Image (cartoon, coloured by chain):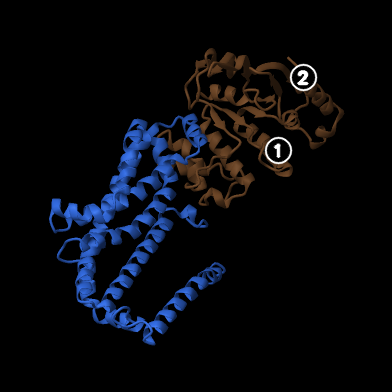
Amino acid sequence: MTRRYPNITSKLPAAIAILLIIALWQGLTGSGLVPSYMMPTPVAVVTALVTQCPVILMHACVTLQEAFYGLLTGILLAGIIATAMIHIPVLERAIYPIMVITQTIPTIAIAPILVLWMGFGMAPKITLVVLTTFFPIAVGLLDGYRSVDRDYIDLMRSMGASNTEIFFHVRFPMALPGFFSGLKISASYAVVGAVVSEWLGGFEGLGVYMTRVRKAYAFDRMFAVIIFIVVISLLLMFGVKLLSRAVMPWMKDSKA
Amino acid sequence: MSLLTASGITKIYDNRKIIENISIHLEKGELVSVLGLSGSGKTTLFQCISGLIKPESGSITLNGEDIMGVPGKVSYMLQKDLLLPHKKIIDNVSLPLRLRHMKKAEARKNAGEYFKDFGLSGTEMQFPSQLSGGMRQRAALLRTYLSADRGVALLDEPFSALDQITKEAIHDWYLDVMDMIELSTLFITHDIDEAIMLSDRIYIMTGDPGTIRDEIIIEEKRPRDRDFGLSEEFLKYKRKIREILSEKD
């Protein structure tokens, strides 16, 4: 109970700010100051969200699948590569620059190429999500591995531990906070990455739905999807937080 | 034959001699201090004895067995308690047993038997961050003890981060525990009072490269009264050590 109270007060300013923005939005659009074909009222957006719920959910199913498989592959790939890099310094020098370069390629530019190579199905979407989620996790994990105090390694060696034992008892658990801070960022990228790739070619998914309503000038629905995506991304980030607390109970009192 | 013997140890780093021709020994049940100013190479000497680094020359034996460059034979404890933050106290302490391929449940059971004697009862399932500095140091000492299956512990300034009162309490406690579990200890410190209070013998290490300048035997029997720290005899030892430490090469 003692923890709950400051938690609420710390989130109060953000809640007030969001409410103020919504109020301002409603004021501007409801009064007719901004015409409704340019910007729907919040009430219209919520109405669209409710009436279009079944359609949005159907498309969301596809998008979430792409995001999930992409994120999962991204995690596996990042885990393997970062772990290999920390053990084989030559590999780190060889791969790290390539990793950075992949991050500078604009997603918008690479998505159509991926569609060209892989078709209109899920494969190019998942690939794009892998490309966007891989980097933050790999870097987080690498930083985590590097942050391990040399003295812990010496201590383990003085107790006769092998390299494998040092990895599982010390390096890996100590890199987990870094991994989770990377995962938190990647989780928010995953849905957005999937949506962007759907925009640029596909038959279903939230991105496809968005391009359709955009062409129909149904901006209330457009905003409804945007809000839906924001909520999903926030939920995913929250899920990562819960997961990190479950996996790292010793970090309970910290804010990681 | 001494329990632990290091003779003629010389270690060079980047063409610079850190320690030169150091010979020390430790007998069973003894607590021997290596006292020296910062930078005299005390920690390098300990790293050599613990097998973490290999000296350029000399020999190190434990019970007559050559242990030079072989880690895992004598246990080593640093100033930082180095408890793994992600492991519960019982798992931190039983780690040396796990590294000897003991099953987790068995290692926990074995380590758990010492918790009472080490004043750690009730902390088994806590994480290190939930313990005070003194308690963490006790847990680290228990881990050191459990990794010292041959009864030798190297302690590198283990108490220097503690406040004076906690330090005195943990000194008394350590000497008790040491006798109880028949642990022989080689102890690094830069604190003259601590060295005189705890040790059977004191090696004084000075210079660059570090060498053993002198060996002082403390005649007063252990365990020593707090009042010993205020006695004329204590001050005599202290004066002598200060003189040696401030002598120029």
Residue drawn at 41 percent across, 56 percent down: A244
Asked which quadrant contains residue B223, the reply is top right
Q: Residue A110: where, in percent of width, then height?
A: 23, 52
**Chain for colour brown:** B
Between residues A85 and B216, which one lies in front from this camera angle?
A85
Residue drawn at 57 percent across, 33 percent down: B77
What type is the residue that disc 1 sits on? Answer: Asp
Q: Residue A235: where, in percent of width, then height?
A: 36, 66
Asked which quadrant contains residue B47, the reply is top right
Between residues B211 and B13, which one lies in front from this camera angle?
B13
Q: Residue B214: where, in percent of width, then height?
A: 72, 16
Between residues A139 and A147, which one lies in front from this camera angle?
A139
On screen, residue B205 versus residue A195, left or right, reads right
Chain hosting mark 1: B
| Residue position marked by numbered label 1 in the rendering | B172
Q: Which mark is residue B244?
A: 2
Distance between the alpha carbons at the discs numbered 2 and 1:
27 Å
Question: How many C-alpha atoms fall within 10 Å of the one at disc 1: few (<14), some, or many (≥20)?
Answer: some
Question: How many C-alpha atoms fall within 10 Å of the one at disc 2: few (<14), some, or many (≥20)?
Answer: some
Residue drawn at 23 percent across, 66 percent down: A207
Q: Residue furthest bottom?
A: A31
On screen, residue A207 versus residue B209, left or right, reads left
**Chain for colour blue:** A
